[in-house]
Amino acid sequence: MLETPHKAGFVSIIGKPNVGKSTLMNVLVGERLSIITSKAQTTRHRIMGILNGDDFQIVYSDTPGIIQPKYELHESMMEFVRGSLEDADVVLFVTDIYEKWDEDEVIKRLEKSKAKILLLINKTDQATSDEVLEKINYWKDKVQAEEIIPISALNKKNTDKVFELILKHLPEHPAYFPKDELTDKPERFFAAEMIREKIFLTYKKEIPYSCEVVIEEFKEDENIIRMRAEIIVERRSQKGIIIGHGGEMLKKVGSQARVDLEDFFQKKVFLEIFVKVKENWRSDPKSLSRFGYKG
Ligand code: GDP
Ligand code: MG
Ligand code: K
């Protein structure tokens, strides 16, 4: 008997502040029946929701808004945006009818990545059809997208089409998360992502890309969550860098992550982090990280 192949993947939503990313997200995730995860409200927590169907699983994530890096922190945040692009299967590149784009670097990155780009021109309810056409032509020259779709997230115009196009471009892959047993693994995944974010903020250039974070233990009691996390690196030398002199760097990552974790879970968090070397784990980074297997 022939079965429809299962599709699954990671969809990143990027764009400048205020173009309508969150509004769109709510339409795409918030109103469908099979949402399983809680929504993170702050932009620094990227995972917004997982959407399941019989033959698909879409893992949506948000990124911090794209900004011109004027400060060290912005630089780090952009590094973080880049990281999430490299993981994405589909990128929803959201702009609105007002926007003109000037940050070519992000576009180049996007085009180089394996991600399929869907370019969405939002807030078309605020423009005439001529103005919308003009915008479509403007973007055609700028970005090599699979599709350019004018939408209105507010009025849910064309948002069903966006959903269908995401499905169309999603790769064939088994589900990354179990579809029925839902609470435990996604929480671990959020926790791992938060630690990963701190790694991006703490270490230079290529180091964060060599790291994966796995939550080995996640025990929730009434008043506290105890977590044991492992940072997996590719080489012994990287382990030393992660730990830092006298353990200082790792301590910094741990305490920053703990603040966010406590905020996210609304509970006290006891966090232990270990660093492990696993040569070439990146040959299958997605499965390793997302399934949370020890490998
Ligand atoms: P984000 O910063 O990219 O996440 O943008 P938000 O989703 O928070 O939206 C920013 C503002 O744009 C809010 O006031 C939204 O109500 C408004 N907005 C979002 N989508 C649309 C749209 O399709 N049309 C109009 N007119 N406004 C929209
Ligand atoms: Mg937002
Ligand atoms: K691409």
Image: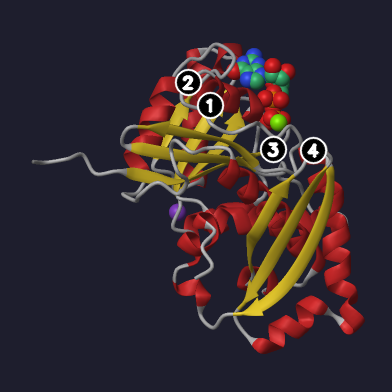
Q: Tag 2 or tag 4, which sits nearer the N-term? A: 2
- Residue neighbourhood size for the residue with mark 4, other residues' Cα within 10 Å, grouped as few (<14), some (14–19), many (≥20): few
Label 1 to label 4, Cα distance in Å? Answer: 30 Å
Quarter of the image holding residue 55? top left
Q: Position of residue 257 (x, y in %)?
A: 81, 55
Which amino acid, by three-letter code, is at mark 4?
Answer: Glu
Q: Specify the amino acid type for callout 3.
A: Lys
**Quarter-of-image position of residue 274:** bottom right
Q: Amino acid at mark 2?
A: Arg
Q: Distance between the Cα atoms at labels 2 and 3?
A: 25 Å
Identity of the residue drawn at 72% across and 82% down: 239
Residue with the mark numbered 2: 32
10 Å crowding of disc 1: few (<14), some (14-19), many (20+): many
Quickly name the residue at label 4.
Answer: 222
Labels 2, 3: front one: 2
Q: Tag 4 or tag 1, which sits nearer the N-term?
A: 1
Judged from the image, the secondary structure of the residue bearing numbered disc 1 is helix
Residue at 42 percent across and 28 percent down: it is: 163
> For the residue labelled by badge 2, is the local secondary structure a helix, a strand or a loop?
loop
Tell me the distance, in whole angstroms, between the alpha carbons under discs 4 and 3.
39 Å
Left or right: residue 32 versus residue 172 is: right
Q: Residue drawn 54% across and 60% down?
A: 289
Which residue is identified by label 3?
A: 16
> Mark 4 or mark 2, which is nearer to you?
4
Which badge, 2 or 3, comes first in the chain's sequence? 3
